[in-house]
Image (tube, helix red, strand yellow):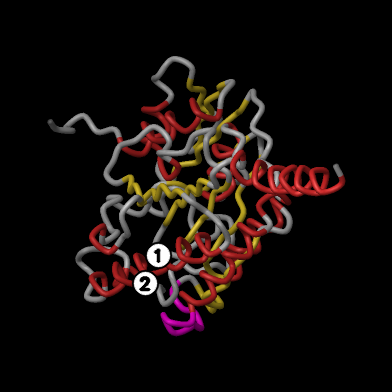
């Protein structure tokens, strides 16, 4: 009788140990990757297909995402979706990625830099991000389009792309857990979200200058921070994404503001600014994509 009790207790202990692991939700990670915050990037020469360093920096951009994936996997992440979120959104070298990683590329797309996210993800990471257009110190600081907008506000607050994207993630109940970029970009995210893991891969000097790390060092730092973020994934909470939302776009020129105000539901606030209101951040995202992408000569 005593021996049988010991055997039964051992089996019960084994079951209690195994069952939580078997029932554990897979750790699915969404990664949105921009290019201005990639280590070494300082000018358009690294950011545009016409730039003499663009081909090389596509490799660095890809390598930093791969570093984040590797670090997250070391901490237990199991699935990944990566949104190529810079320029024409066709920058990542997709043949460098391991099997099982889904990559979102091309545009237009309703969720912009966050296309592909949904409520099944455990965490979101921002790789290669930059600071807001209102930041006077950040490398390549802008919001959505440096050529188009002088300010982008949501409910009266000046927004960075990271703030908009964290709110979109919050709509789906997904917390942002890690960001990489210069110290201004990382600082903006941490000011908004708290103890998000931050990989500072360069220190800003001016809009077009920075003190940068070697690519190997940047990638190692990103890998370590991504690993730390997933180890701490239960510490993070999604950004509140409850509407209504009031978006204000301030154009650098008069005419776009005038034309946008012709649309029902769009109000012209001043000579350069229009306002659009919606109950959902998803509708705000769709409006921004329309405002930045629509042209009458679009084909096909």
x, y (%) of residue 212?
48, 82
Q: Which residue is at the far top?
A: 264
Q: Nearer the viewer, mark 1 or mark 2?
A: 1
x, y (%) of residue 217?
48, 82
Q: Nearer the viewer, residue 37 or 276?
A: 37
Queried whether the magenta region covers residue 219, the answer comes back as: no
Quadrant of the rendering where the N terminus is positioned: top right
- The crowding category of the residue bearing disc 1, from other C-alpha atoms within 10 Å (few below 14, some 14 to 19, many at least 20), is some
Which range of residues does the magenta coloring cover? 208-217
Q: Is residue 89 left or right of residue 36?
A: left
Q: Is residue 87 left or right of residue 190?
A: left
Asked where in the image residue 42 lies, by quadrant, the reply is bottom left
Quadrant of the rendering where the C terminus is positioned: top left
- Return the mark for residue 66: 1
Identified at 32% across, 59% down, the residue is: 98
Q: Is mark 1 on a helix, strand or loop?
A: helix
Asked where in the image residue 152 lies, by quadrant, the reply is top right
Queried whether the magenta region covers residue 209, the answer comes back as: yes
The answer to whether 256 is drawn above or below residue 67 in the figure is above
- Return the mark for residue 300: none
Identified at 24% across, 33% down, the residue is: 295
Q: Is mark 2 on a helix, strand or loop?
A: loop
x, y (%) of residue 106?
27, 44
Q: Nearer the viewer, residue 156 or 186?
A: 186
Q: Nearer the viewer, residue 234 or 12?
A: 12
x, y (%) of residue 54?
26, 70
Name the residue carrying label 2.
43
Q: Distance between the residues labelled 1 and 2?
A: 23 Å
Identified at 83% across, 43% down, the residue is: 5
Identified at 52% across, 60% down, the residue is: 72
């Amino acid at each position: 009788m005593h021996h049988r009790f010991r055997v039964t207790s051992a089996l019960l202990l084994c079951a209690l140990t195994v069952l939580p692991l078997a029932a554990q939700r897979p750790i699915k990670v969404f990664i949105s990757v921009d290019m201005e915050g990639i280590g070494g990037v300082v000018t358009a020469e690294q950011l545009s297909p016409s730039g003499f360093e663009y081909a090389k920096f596509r490799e660095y951009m890809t390598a930093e995402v791969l570093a984040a994936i590797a670090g997250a996997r070391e901490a237990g992440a199991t699935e990944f979706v990566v949104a190529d979120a810079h320029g024409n959104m066709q920058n990542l070298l997709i043949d460098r990625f391991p099997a099982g990683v889904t990559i979102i590329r091309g545009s237009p797309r309703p969720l912009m830099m966050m296309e592909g996210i949904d409520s099944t993800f455990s965490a979101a990471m921002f790789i290669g991000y930059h600071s807001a257009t209102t930041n006077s110190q950040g490398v390549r600081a802008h919001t959505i389009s440096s050529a188009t907008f002088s300010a982008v506000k949501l409910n009266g607050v000046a927004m960075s792309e990271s703030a908009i994207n964290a709110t979109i993630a919050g709509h789906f109940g997904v917390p942002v857990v890690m960001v990489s970029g210069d110290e201004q970009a990382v600082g903006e995210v941490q000011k908004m979200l708290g103890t998000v893991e931050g990989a500072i891969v360069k220190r800003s000097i001016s809009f077009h200058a920075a003190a940068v790390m070697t690519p190997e060092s940047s990638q190692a730092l990103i890998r370590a921070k991504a690993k730390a973020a997933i180890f701490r994934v239960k510490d993070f909470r999604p950004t509140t994404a409850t509407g209504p939302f009031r978006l204000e776009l301030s154009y650098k020129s008069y005419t776009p503001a005038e034309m946008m105000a012709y649309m029902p539901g769009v109000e012209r606030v001043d000579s350069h600014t229009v306002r659009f209101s919606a109950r959902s951040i998803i509708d705000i995202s769709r409006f921004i994509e329309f405002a930045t992408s629509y042209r009458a000569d679009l084909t096909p």
